[in-house]
Amino acid sequence: MNESLTEPKKQRYQYDHPRPAVTVDIILFVFQEDQLRVLLIKRANDPFKAKWALPGGFIGENEDLYDAALRELKEETNVSNVYLEQLYTVGKPDRDPRTRVITVAYFALLSAEEVAQQEVHGASDAGEARWWDIYALPELAFDHQAILDYALQRLRWKLEWTALGFLLLPSEFTLSELQRVYETILHEPLDKRNFRRKVLAAGVIEPTGNMRAGDHRPARLYRFTATAVEMEQARRRFP
Amino acid sequence: MNESLTEPKKQRYQYDHPRPAVTVDIILFVFQEDQLRVLLIKRANDPFKAKWALPGGFIGENEDLYDAALRELKEETNVSNVYLEQLYTVGKPDRDPRTRVITVAYFALLSAEEVAQQEVHGASDAGEARWWDIYALPELAFDHQAILDYALQRLRWKLEWTALGFLLLPSEFTLSELQRVYETILHEPLDKRNFRRKVLAAGVIEPTGNMRAGDHRPARLYRFTATAVEMEQARRRFP
DNA sequence: AATTGAAAGTGTCATCGTGACAACATCCTC
DNA sequence: GAGGATGTTGTCACGATGACACTTTCAATT
């Protein structure tokens, strides 16, 4: 590439003080085939070329952080319609070898229905995108492993204190399915009777009246109540 | 000021893409004279000149966010030796009328001992610094009121689920003093017997053997146990 | 020396949430 | 209709918590 030819076209930005680059990264969790999975992209360029990384990218000049996270997710992986909340901001000076980068990490959940409907694929500068079992991850680029660990911690925590599990399931689900989500995320077995008692007592789910047929005894289907969804939505964003 | 004269001396920073300015703001709480207070500085310059604002400033070119928060606190208000944890990152495009600013807000606590020892005063570009009762705040600059509301919410929350109250007290304190901290922060009265039972059962405090003399019946003095302090320290930072 | 004022200190009971635990019901397939 | 697999249901013991009132101890006052 000839610098002198492209130079006139490029816009340059000047500041009196040094400014870090600011990016958003997204940790997107789904529950699929009895696994808790995250979406990763394979890096097409150096640094960490061919390593797997969290999807993300630079924020726009006039773009809210939340919107930037949604946009990057859409651009890099073609995923939309997610639950999204801010997780943490990392900014160690040497975390990106190229330049100073501040990254605002976002935590996202995608329902099973959406996973089935959406075609996930790498796009733009991301080479390839795929789901990874949270308990069998490849080596990650940058400090993304630490961010992911923290996201998982947050997910577990929220699961115990809020009723967030439903965001990973389709709109109708059985109690056993819900329990499997909890067991997978918390990574420990739960007592069936206690689980049902607790989840029903919380008043966040209600029977739909339908049944799920299968190889065995049909199971009652539940949905999350409107108030439960609203409560989560309300609590979701800052402030 | 003559631009053409100063121009050659100034270093300029150029980037291919626009970059936001990144700042850290600190919400520093203390407990003083039976009030929960925050440290605010009076802005010396526009925008929001003469309005009160959270202390904070630009991060250094090669400086961790956490370190930047400590430095700004020291520079602007002469306060050091605080408990500090990241709170939230705000970045709405129009939150600062001058330029795009991303602000990483930090949440800080200062013990009563440190408050007494340190002379708090405005410095550098901050005109004036003083403590404000959290329940009688002036109008704040930028979106600082929203950040402060969120910080208070976090403080209350942490108080209920962790044993953070001690960070606001001197190293020796009576149970009544501790209860007043909790009541002031939670903004509701607590039952004396239940409070004592709970706090003692948690095993985070122990009697020092000393007594506080006063106008009335002397009160047993307590300190927080080493393990309690360590637990908080350990939980404090990302990841 | 006795009284008063003010804060320190202490125990019980009813209730609720929770963890531990096992048997029966219902569907399908063979 | 027997077997296999999953769905569904209740009890009991224990610990945590909220509600609630009186006595103790010191200093200051009379």
Image: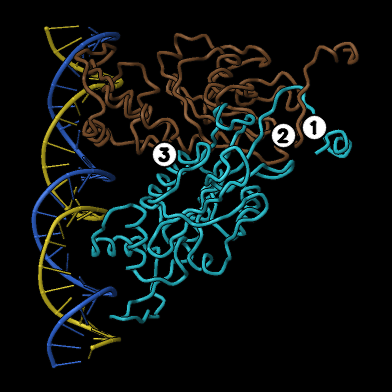
Chain colours: A cyan, B brown, C yellow, D blue
Q: Could you give the CA–CA distance between mark 2 and mark 1, rounded to whole angstroms?
A: 8 Å
Question: From what the image shows, is residue A178 above or below residue B119?
Answer: below
* 10 Å crowding of disc 1: few (<14), some (14-19), many (20+): few
Marks 3 and 2 share the same chain: yes
Between A181 and B209, the one nearer to me in the picture = A181
Tell me which amino acid carries mark 3.
Answer: Trp
Q: Are marks 1 and 3 on the same chain?
A: no
The subunit letter for the residue under badge 3 reads B
**Residue under numbered circle 2:** B19
* Front of the two marks 1 and 3: 1
Position in image of residue A185 (x %, y %): 37, 54
Q: Nearer the viewer, residue A200 or A71?
A: A71
Residue A91: image location, x then y, percent: 56, 31
> Mark 1, chain letter?
A
Numbered label attached to residue A13: 1
Mark 1: amino acid: Tyr
Tell me whether the residue at label 2 lies in contact with that at label 1, contact meaning CB atoms closer than 8 angstroms. yes
Q: Quadrant of the N terminus of chain B?
A: top right
Read off the residue under disc 3: B157
Q: Are marks 3 and 2 in contact (CB under 8 Å)?
A: no
Q: Quadrant of the image for the C terminus of chain B? A: top left
Find residue A118 and report its horizontal and vertical position in percent: 57, 66
Q: What residue is drawn where x is 26% and y is 32%? A: B199
| Disc 2 residue crowd, few under 14, some 14–19, many 20+, Cα 10 Å | many
- From the viewer's perspective, is A108 left or right of B16? left
